[in-house]
Image: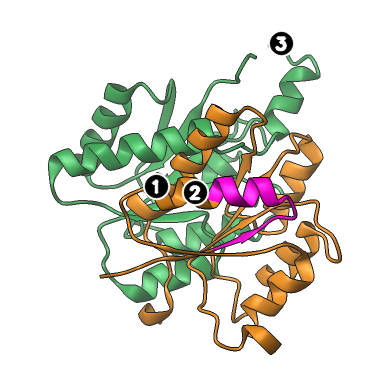
Chain colours: A orange, B green
Amino acid sequence: MFKPEILLVDDNPADLDLTSEVLARNERPKRVSSVMNGVEALGFLRHEGKYADTPDPDLILLDLNLPRKDGRAVLAEVKADPLLRRTPIVVFSTSQAEFDIMQSYNLGANSYVTKPGDLPEFVQAVESIENFWFGCARLPRKEEQ
Amino acid sequence: MKFSRAEILLVEDSQEDLDLTLHSLGHERVATDIIVARDGEEALDLLFCRGAGSGRSFENPPRLVLLDLKLPKVDGLEVLRQIKSDPRTRTIPVVILTSSKEERDLIRGYELGVNSYIQKPVDFEQFRKTIKQLGLYWLITNQAPVAGRTARAAGQSS
């Protein structure tokens, strides 16, 4: 059975924990990995150093304001890389700024979901992401190349 | 908070699939306005505000384009390519909704920058459920690009 891989990129440990927990709660089996800055995210995706054996994610949840390398820069690099660009990226950020939303789509984000500050809404947003991307959409996974 | 009207552009040449999709969207009340294009050329005219779409403006794009792949006149992947390679339209979310099972189409779609890709379920109930989920996600969970909202906020009252 297909077991999707999700990569969470977020510098806030509480948000990472909560997102992983909500994703794990759903009955669909999946594997969740997380990194806390933009440099690690690209290292993970390119299998560099300690990430030599990491799986290729089927979906990336990407925060925008990240240390070392900004989420916008990660988005731009992934979408310009022929080996990575087809991987869907959902920007998951607290920013509701029109500029951030437009810029994310311009850089090739597949979707933009505002991270709610309120707990029940946060849970609902993650569930909605899970339901759509794993229950409804078809993902361009590695085996299908 | 006041939301702008959720307009969907549905590009579909099969009458049966069109009826089914419209029925499901209407049934789930996820969209108030649905415009339909029956071939790729008409879809491009509507999106690029020319021909049949000459009354439209780039400041008020659809919130979502649901795009079939096998279309008369201009193929769905070509429609997608044109949307995603033009700065005036590239931020519009496009979801491919197709019965194609071809891996090639799936990969090519994501390569060309499609926002998401859905294979039409054959089963009626499953189809309706899928349309409901995609409507909820793209019209409620997902933040649409804001060009249209900005134009409205700037006082376009006509």
Of badges 1 and 3, nearer the viewer stands: 1
Q: Is residue A109 magenta?
A: no
Marks 2 and 1 in Cβ contact (< 8 Å): yes
Amino acid, disc 1:
Arg
Gap between marks 1 and 3 measured at Cα: 46 Å
Amino acid, disc 2:
Glu
Toward the right, the furthest residue is A68
Numbered circle sitting on residue A84: none
Q: Residue at x 42, y 31 (%)?
A: B35
Numbered circle sitting on residue A25: 1
Of badges 2 and 3, nearer the viewer stands: 2
Residue A7 lies, in percent from the top left, at 57, 64
**Side of A134 relative to A113 (left or right):** left
The N terminus of chain A appears in which quarter of the rendering?
Answer: bottom left
From which residue to which does the magenta span run?
A: A7-19
Numbered circle sitting on residue B157: 3
Does residue A48 show up?
no
Q: Is residue A17 magenta?
A: yes
Would you identify the image quadrant in which residue A61 lies?
bottom right
Dot 3 alpha-carbon crowd within 10 angstroms: few under 14, some 14 to 19, many 20 or more = few
Label 1, secondary structure: give it: helix
Dot 1 alpha-carbon crowd within 10 angstroms: few under 14, some 14 to 19, many 20 or more = few
Label 3, secondary structure: give it: loop
The C terminus of chain A appears in which quarter of the rendering?
Answer: bottom left
Gap between marks 2 and 1 measured at Cα: 6 Å
Q: Nearer the viewer, residue A48 or A96?
A: A48
Marks 1 and 3 in Cβ contact (< 8 Å): no
Numbered circle sitting on residue A21: 2
Residue B117 lies, in percent from the top left, at 41, 57
